[in-house]
Image: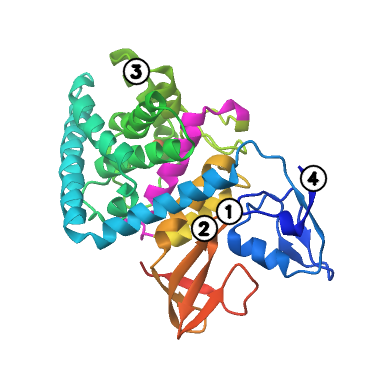
Amino acid sequence: MGFIRIEELKPGMKLKTDLVSEKGELFLAEGTILSEREVERINNLEITYVNIADSEEHNPIEYYEEFEKEMLEVQDEQEGKILYEIKEEEFKRRYDDSYNTVRDLFEGIRIGKSADLDDVRKPVETLLSLLLDSFSVVPKLLRLQERDDYTYRHSLNVSLLSTMIGKWLSMGDEDLKNLAYAGLFHDLGKCKIPLKIINKPGPLTRDEWELMKHHPVHGYNILKNTSDLSKNVLMGVLLHHEREDGSGYPFGYKGEGIHIFAKIVAVADTYDAMTSSRAYQKKTSPFKVVESIAHDSFSSLDPKVSRIFAERMSRYFVGNTVKLSDGRIGQVVYIYPNFPLRPVVMTDGEFIDFSKKQRISIEEMMG
Ligand SMILES: [Fe+2]
């Protein structure tokens, strides 16, 4: 598209280069997708032209319609209390069904039974249909009580989150179903690792860690030999600990060499592991975890997957209470699609826009 006059700017357009003020300060970064408010802010600057990227990906109208639709659906549901409660129950019931089946499957494999995936299919697909038909599974997932057994809950959550990410990346139904399986089975290979290592309340020794690093390969072998799952699912399981910069295991593959399913499961796995409390690890707030995932999009996690995850997850922080570094308490009232971690916060009747430089910061997001 190239340089266009600022009067012609529209929300949804994407900056081709950094927008810098006369004093050399960065005003908006390259790649920013302009919101209505940002278009207004640019219009107040002393400039005439802005360099806009060609964009097949972002049709401004579609982008905004989609964004508003999602926000509206979530809000409607929160206001329509009866409908909301029924749905929450329904979600819990299907979640529990899947949880029990996953537990039976994992326990069976641990005692040497072969994996019978037919038992898992139905509950997982019913849970999945709920996820595909609803915009509001993520908040429900965030409110679920933690359970005693980490592995089963974690497997199910990674399955749901991986499918959500696939949906956000506009993947088709067959891929979404397979992503649900890849997430569900990503740690299946841990059934082959001695329980005393799995449940060890502290750091592993070198030898224990070497054994632990085999779990993706064990999982791959169990599934390859006992099922007719798609190759995508097998790759998601085998490569979910590989990292973009080659720092992962078991093979140390880099960027392009890592299957997209594995990249998605990696983000979902990281998020759920960090937001859960375990014997030796305190849970971290979802805000900090999303912040850290966005940060890792520059090194170990796939940039496209982790950025869409950070952007979409952060929308659920609207309405959350935050503690500011000056001790004040505020409420998140707006999240910029492109600066998910720099929201607008209202405190004492004042709006603080963290997308601009502020002398205070957000210390804690309290939910
Ligand atoms: Fe794993």
Identify the residue at image location x=24%, y=54%. 144
What is the CA distance from the residue labelled 2 to the residue labelled 1? 6 Å
| Above or below: residue 59 compared with residue 35 | above
Given the current orientation, which residue lies at the most extreme front position? 7
Labels 3 and 1: the sequence-earlier one:
3
Return the disc, 3 or 4, that comes first in the chain's sequence: 4
Question: Disc 3 residue type?
Answer: Leu
In what element is the residue under mark 2? Answer: helix
Q: Which quadrant would the C terminus be assigned to in this image?
A: bottom left
Asked whether, in this view, residue 63 is left or right of residue 279, the answer is right
Give the labeled residue for mark 3. 229
Q: For residue 264: magenta?
A: yes
Q: Position of residue 34 (x, y in %)?
A: 63, 55
Q: Is residue 88 magenta?
A: no
Residue under circle 2? Answer: 291
Quarter of the displayed picture in which ligand 1 can be seen: top left
Gap between marks 3 and 1, in whole Å?
Answer: 33 Å
Q: Are marks 3 and 1 in contact (CB under 8 Å)?
A: no
Alpha-carbon span between mark 1 and mark 4: 29 Å
Q: Position of residue 42 (x, y in %)?
A: 71, 64
Look at mark 4 in the image and give the residue it sits on: 2
On the image, the x and y values in percent for residue 251 come to 54, 28
How would you rate the neighbour count of disc 1 (Cα within 10 Å): few for under 14, some for 14-19, many for 20 or more? some
Magenta stretch bounds: 256-283
Residue denoted by label 1 = 295
For the residues labelled 2 and 1, say whether their Cβ atoms are less than 8 Å apart: yes
Q: Residues within 10 Å of mark 3 (few under 14, many from 20)?
A: some
**Amino acid type, callout 1:** His
Q: Secondary structure at mark 1?
A: helix
